[in-house]
Image (cartoon, helix red, strand yellow):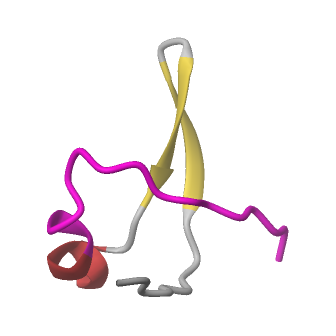
Amino acid sequence: MTEILKFVATIVKQGDMRVLIIPKRLHPKISKRDGEQVKVIVEEI
């Protein structure tokens, strides 16, 4: 099932990687996707 979540995230540097910071209020919805690949679309606001 596809679920679309729209939220404002921050991109931070962690070593050689970039990480998206997801708001804490969305952690319950996101945690069920641990280990899965998801599609992310980046749009400047």
Q: How many marks?
A: 0
Residue name at image x 84 percent, y 68 percent: 44
**Residue 27 image point, x, y percent:** 21, 73
Q: Residue furthest top?
A: 16
**Residue 20 image point, x, y percent:** 50, 51
Q: Which residues are magenta?
A: 30-45
**Residue 34 image point, x, y percent:** 20, 53
Q: Is residue 32 left or right of residue 5?
A: left
The chief SS type of the magenta part is: loop
Residue 38 within the segment the image draws in magenta? yes
> Is 29 in front, or is 25?
29
Q: Quadrant location of the N terminus?
A: bottom left
**Residue 14 image point, x, y percent:** 46, 25
Q: Is residue 25 left or right of residue 40?
A: left
**Whether residue 22 is situated above or below residue 7 in the rendered picture:** above
Q: Quadrant location of the C terminus?
A: bottom right
Residue name at image x 55 percent, y 67 percent: 9
